[in-house]
Image (cartoon, grey):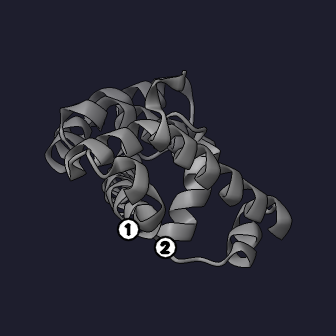
C-alpha cells in the first residue's frame, strides 16, 4: 500500500473507528486502540490497496483490540480477587484491623508495582488457572522460570501487604 492510499484509508476510517472504540471501551483507551490497529494493519496487511477492504480489516482489528482490552480489564479484576482469596489466610494476621476495601486497594497498588510480564504470569496462573508448564509453553520460557517468578511475586506482594510504607 502506498502512502497516498494509506492516508486516504486513515482519513476515511478514523472517525468511525474512534466511535467504535469509545463505545466499546470508553474514552480512556480509544485513541490507543485505533493507533495500535493501524500499526497492526500496516504490519500485516500493507499489500491491501483497496480502501474499502482496508477499512473493513481495520474495523475488525479495532473490534478485536477492544474485546482484548475488555478481557484484560476483567482478567485483572479477577486476578485481584483470586489472589486475595488464595492469600487471605496468610494476610489475615496482619490485616485484621483493615477493612476489605483497604486491603484490595493496597493489593492493587502492589500488583501495579510489578512489571507487566510478571503481572501477565500471575494472571495466567491465578485467573486463567494455567499450570506453570502451560504458561512456560505459551511464553516460550522454562517451567522453572515461571515457578520462580510466581514465588517471588507472591512473596513481594506479601511483604508489600504487610508494610506498604516500606518504599
What is the crowding at mark 1: few (fewer than 14 residues within 10 Å), some, or many (at least 20)?
A: few
Q: Secondary structure at mark 1?
A: helix
Along the line of sight, the residue nearer the viewer: 8 or 138: 138
What is the crowding at mark 2: few (fewer than 14 residues within 10 Å), some, or many (at least 20)?
A: some
Foreground tag (1 vs 2): 1
Residue 17 lies in what quarter of the image?
A: top left
Residue at the spot x=30%, y=41% of the render? 105
> Looking at the image, is mark 1 or mark 2 earlier in the sequence?
1
- Residue 120 position within the rendered picture, expressed as x and y whole percent measured from the top left: 57, 54
Along the line of sight, the residue nearer the viewer: 26 or 17: 26
- Residue denoted by label 2: 128
Is the C terminus in the top left, top right, bottom left or bottom right quadrant? top right
- Residue denoted by label 1: 85
Is the N terminus in the top left, top right, bottom left or bottom right quadrant? top right
- Residue 144 position within the rendered picture, expressed as x and y whole percent measured from the top left: 84, 65
Regarding residue 44, the answer to whether it shows in the image is no
The Cα atoms of the two marked residues, 1 and 2, are separated by: 15 Å
Along the line of sight, the residue nearer the viewer: 33 or 116: 116
Judge from the rendering whether residue 5 lies leftward or rightward of residue 145; answer left or right: left
- Residue 75 position within the rendered picture, expressed as x and y whole percent measured from the top left: 38, 61
Along the line of sight, the residue nearer the viewer: 19 or 108: 108
Give above or below for 121 relative to 40.
below
- Residue 8 position within the rendered picture, expressed as x and y whole percent measured from the top left: 37, 28
Regarding residue 83, the answer to whether it shows in the image is yes
Residue at the spot x=75%, y=65% of the render? 147
Judge from the rendering whether residue 20 lies leftward or rightward of residue 106; answer left or right: left
Amino acid at each position: 500500500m502506498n502512502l497516498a492510499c494509506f492516508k486516504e484509508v486513515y482519513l476515511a476510517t478514523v472517525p468511525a473507528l474512534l466511535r467504535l472504540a469509545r463505545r466499546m471501551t470508553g474514552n480512556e483507551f480509544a485513541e490507543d486502540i485505533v493507533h495500535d490497529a493501524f500499526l497492526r494493519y500496516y504490519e500485516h496487511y500493507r499489500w491491501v490497496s483497496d480502501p474499502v477492504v482496508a477499512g473493513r480489516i481495520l474495523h475488525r482489528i479495532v473490534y478485536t483490540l477492544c474485546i482484548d482490552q475488555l478481557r484484560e480489564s476483567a482478567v485483572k479484576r479477577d486476578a485481584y480477587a483470586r489472589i486475595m482469596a488464595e492469600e487471605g489466610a496468610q494476610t489475615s494476621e496482619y490485616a485484621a484491623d483493615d477493612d476489605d476495601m483497604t486491603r484490595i486497594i493496597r493489593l492493587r497498588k502492589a500488583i501495579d508495582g510489578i512489571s507487566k510480564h510478571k503481572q501477565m504470569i500471575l494472571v495466567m496462573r491465578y485467573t486463567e488457572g494455567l499450570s506453570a508448564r502451560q504458561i512456560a509453553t505459551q511464553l516460550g520460557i522454562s517451567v522453572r522460570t515461571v515457578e520462580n517468578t510466581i514465588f517471588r511475586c507472591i512473596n513481594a506482594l506479601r511483604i508489600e501487604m504487610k508494610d506498604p510504607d516500606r518504599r
